[in-house]
Image (cartoon, rainbow, N blue to C red):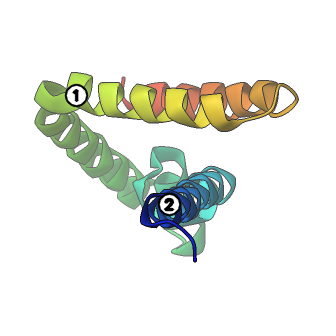
Amino acid sequence: MIPARSRNLALFFLLGAALVGGVLGFSADRLVTRERVCRWGDQAGMRRLFGDELGLNADQRAIVDSLLDDKHRQIAAVVRPVKPQLDSISDRTADQINRLLTPAQRPVFDVMRRTAKANEDKYNK
């Protein structure tokens, strides 16, 4: 019979591995599919969606652009007070993920993070 301590240790390891695997899979999926998932939150995508797919005329486009700019400013104002906390959570999680990766995986993950950060910075100005 397996000692209780060894059995508990194995169970915690399996649960931890499943949790980490889920987090890694979810994070990778969000980074890879960001264009499709965030289409409605993407300023350029929204302008393209409204302008091209709805066939807006120049006057309508100007008004929609103004409305989207105002929406973006309002959202940025709401997020601004908690942005440092959100960044801290993201950085901590990225550090934890980075420690799990192999030396070959780390540069790929770094590029993914830089790309995501650049996209975020572009829309938070």
Residue at numbered disc 1: 85
Q: Which residue is rendered at x = 11% and y = 26% of the image?
A: 81
CB contact under 8 Å: marks 1 and 2: no
Please say whether residue 51 is visible from this viewpoint.
Answer: no
Out of 124 and 67, give the one closest to the viewer: 124
What element does badge 1 sit on? helix
Residue at numbered disc 2: 19
Q: Mark 1 Cα within 10 Å, few/some/many (few <14, many 20+)?
A: few
Q: Which residue is rendered at x = 58% and y = 37% of the image?
A: 97
Left or right, residue 114 beside residue 42: right
The amino acid marked with disc number 2 is Leu
| Circle 1 or circle 2, nearest the eye | 2
The amino acid marked with disc number 1 is Gln
What residue occupies the far front of the structure in this picture?
Answer: 1
Out of 83 and 70, give the one closest to the viewer: 83
Q: CA distance from mark 1 to mark 2?
A: 23 Å
Quadrant containing the C terminus in the rendered view:
top left
